[in-house]
Image (tube, helix red, strand yellow):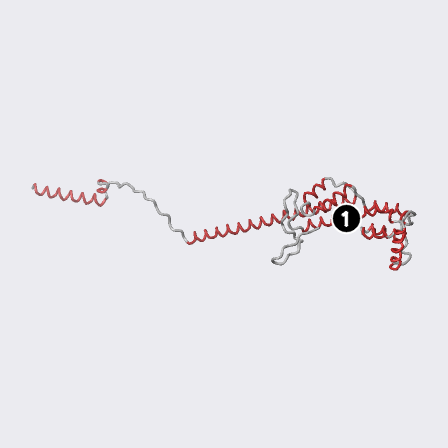
Amino acid sequence: MTLFVALVAFLLGAALVAWLGTRGYLAMLNPQPVQPAVTTAAAPPPATAAQLSAIGTVEGRLAMLEDRISRIDFQTDAAAGNAGRAEGLLIAFAARRMIDRGEPLGHVADQLRLRFTNAQPRAVQTVIDFAQNPVTIDGLAARLEALSPELTVTQSDESLWDRARHEVTSLFVVRRDSGALATPAARIERARVMLTARRIDSAIGEVERLPGADAADTWIADARRFEATQKALDLLETTAMLEPNRLQDSTGQAVDQPSPLAPVAPAGEPTEAVVE
């Protein structure tokens, strides 16, 4: 009887253990010890083809950006050089207008010295000196009119050599022109026309052939000064447009940017500078 009871108890216990195992209660009653986590440095994944392509694209964009910046710098230099030339040309134009009106140059003289002295010192000095004692086309014409009575008659105190020279000159002129065109009145009229047309050399030539040309010595000297100043202004304007390396801007810096109006020199040949 005792053995039977023990067998029944064993079977009941085995059945209970099996039931607890199927329900998972045994794992809860016997937990496993927790192992400490070990921290390790994970290696970065290798770069993919897309990433390498992206890096190449960025480098290409940087190269393009650098090229664009260099072109912008070149364009900026070109714009600054052209601006310096344009300003110099405007200064030369302003000087011409003042000279034609017989006005003092004022601050324009300082700008002429700053911008052009390094390239055309004699032309600059010619213009500035003339402006200190100016004459105008209208003034020369008026003075010629006032001198007409003296220019059309032979001076009583004229030397024999001067008289002979005038006679010989008149003979050659008569061969070239008709008698009416060779008269003193006709010469004076042509001189006036030449002055109006700003052909100063031709006007001087007509006056020098007059019988009383000695009375016009001062007039001739002033007319020649006016003509020399006009040529100096022409040279300054040409310098502003074409001078390759000696023109300066308003800050005194050299305008070394080639002029867009300058002829392109063949390869290996330097561009010639504007000279006096």
Q: Which residue is mark 1?
A: 228
| 7 with respect to 130 (left or right) | left
| 157 with respect to 10 (left or right) | right
Q: Secondary structure at mark 1?
A: helix
Where 219 sits versus 265, above or below? above
| 275 with respect to 56 (left or right) | right
Mark 1: give few (<14), some (14-19) or many (20+) Cα within 10 Å.
some
User: Extreme bottom residue here?
Assistant: 175
Nearer-the-camera pick, 154 or 246:
154
Q: How many marks?
A: 1
| 209 with respect to 14 (left or right) | right
Q: Residue at x 63, y 51 (%)?
A: 258
At which x and y percent is residue 271?
A: 64, 54
At which x and y percent is residue 4?
A: 9, 43
Q: Residue at x 66, y 52 (%)?
A: 273
User: Extreme front residue here?
Assistant: 160
Q: Amino acid at mark 1?
A: Ala
Q: Residue at x 34, y 44 (%)?
A: 41
* Quadrant position of residue 1: top left
Nearer-the-camera pick, 154 or 112:
154
At which x and y percent is residue 112?
A: 70, 44
Nearer-the-camera pick, 134 or 70:
134
At which x and y percent is residue 67?
A: 54, 51
